[in-house]
Image: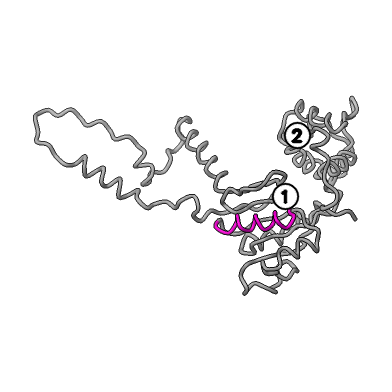
């Protein structure tokens, strides 16, 4: 069986746009579900709806693969599964190492979707000596001292980083120096890599913040929707109400100063920085 080190996908050399490449796994997931239900053919409209794109975009994407379907019949499901799998390189064996076997790393190691999609977990690696030799998902954890030899002996070109943010860049540098050219990063930090190395980042906190933005907008736009809960941060961001016009001259007070001090005290130290504890996400 071919290995990931010697056989690379030809999508870039054949001029398939990156946006199309990013949608191919969506099509493959939808097609695989149809195949499991023994559906022989599918129209572009049905497949587009299942993948969450519009049918014109789907037909354009498939034209890059040289697949145009049959008028009145649609696309052959099994052939498209094979065609997209081949284009993505999933008909090959891709050995993968996972570095950082904490809660997230262990969950990734136990994820059954790797093997079914052509990815073989070749090794689990952790810096904690107490973890060395412990079995996780049927594999003994190896120490980071062995990282370079593991990559060399297994022909690894894809690495998964599930370490804390502070250790991620050092691990990345070692992976790249050892020959890894593609990295899936679950650490809450941005990695610096040389040209020729691809990095994909998964960060649940960013996705949740985007959802919070949309929820906040919906809360303000939809009549009858409950307002967002108040809190120290909301209180700090909310403009102060204009004071009522006095009916008679009054002596100055310190209430405004006191309110500002209370807001400052309420918001100071209430959040962690960008390098604080950030949850990561499991693949679907």
Q: Which residues are magenta?
A: 166-181
Residue 54: x and y in percent read: 73, 29
- Number of numbered tags placed on the structure image: 2
Residue 128: x and y in percent read: 61, 70
The question of residue 59 being in magenta is answered with no
Q: Is residue 218 above or below residue 199?
A: above
Horizontal side of 123 relative to 6 (left or right) equals left
Residue at x 50%, y 33% (from the top left corner):
218
Q: Is residue 172 above or below residue 25?
A: below
* Inter-mark Cα distance, 2 to 1: 19 Å
Front-lying residue, 175 or 2: 175
- Residue linked to disc 1: 182
Q: Are marks 2 and 1 in contact (CB under 8 Å)?
A: no
Q: Within 10 Å of the Cα at label 2, are there few (<14), some (14-19), or many (20+) other Cα atoms?
A: some
Residue 20 disc label = 2
Quarter of the image where one finds residue 65: top right
Residue at x 76%, y 55% (from the top left corner):
114
The question of residue 174 being in magenta is answered with yes
Front-lying residue, 203 or 146: 146
Residue at x 36%, y 39% (from the top left corner):
237
Horizontal side of 266 relative to 38 (left or right) equals left
Residue 43: x and y in percent read: 83, 31
């Amino acid at each position: 069986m071919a290995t990931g080190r010697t056989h690379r996908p030809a999508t870039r050399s054949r001029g398939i746009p990156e946006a199309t490449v990013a949608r191919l796994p969506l099509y493959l997931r939808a097609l695989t579900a149809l195949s499991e239900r023994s559906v022989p053919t599918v129209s572009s409209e049905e497949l587009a709806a299942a993948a969450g794109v519009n049918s014109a975009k789907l037909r354009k994407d498939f034209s890059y693969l040289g697949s145009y379907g049959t008028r009145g019949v649609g696309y052959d499901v099994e052939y498209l599964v094979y065609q997209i799998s081949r284009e993505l390189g999933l008909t090959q064996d891709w050995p993968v190492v996972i570095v950082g076997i904490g809660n997230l790393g262990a969950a990734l190691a136990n994820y059954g979707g790797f093997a079914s999609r052509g990815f073989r977990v070749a090794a689990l690696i952790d810096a904690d000596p107490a973890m060395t030799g412990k079995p996780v998902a049927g594999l003994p954890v190896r120490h980071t001292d062995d990282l370079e030899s593991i990559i060399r002996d297994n022909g690894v070109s894809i690495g998964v980083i599930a370490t804390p943010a502070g250790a991620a860049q050092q691990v990345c540098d070692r992976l790249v120096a050892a020959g890894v050219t593609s990295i899936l990063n679950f650490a809450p930090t941005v990695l610096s890599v040389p040209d020729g190395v691809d990095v994909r980042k998964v960060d649940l906190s960013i996705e949740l913040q985007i959802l919070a933005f949309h929820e906040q907008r919906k809360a303000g736009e939809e009549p009858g929707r409950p307002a967002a809960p108040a809190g120290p941060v909301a209180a700090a961001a909310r403009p102060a109400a204009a004071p009522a016009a006095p009916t008679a001259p009054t002596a100055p007070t310190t209430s405004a100063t006191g309110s500002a001090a209370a807001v400052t005290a309420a918001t100071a130290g209430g959040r962690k920085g960008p390098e604080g504890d950030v949850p990561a996400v499991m693949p679907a």
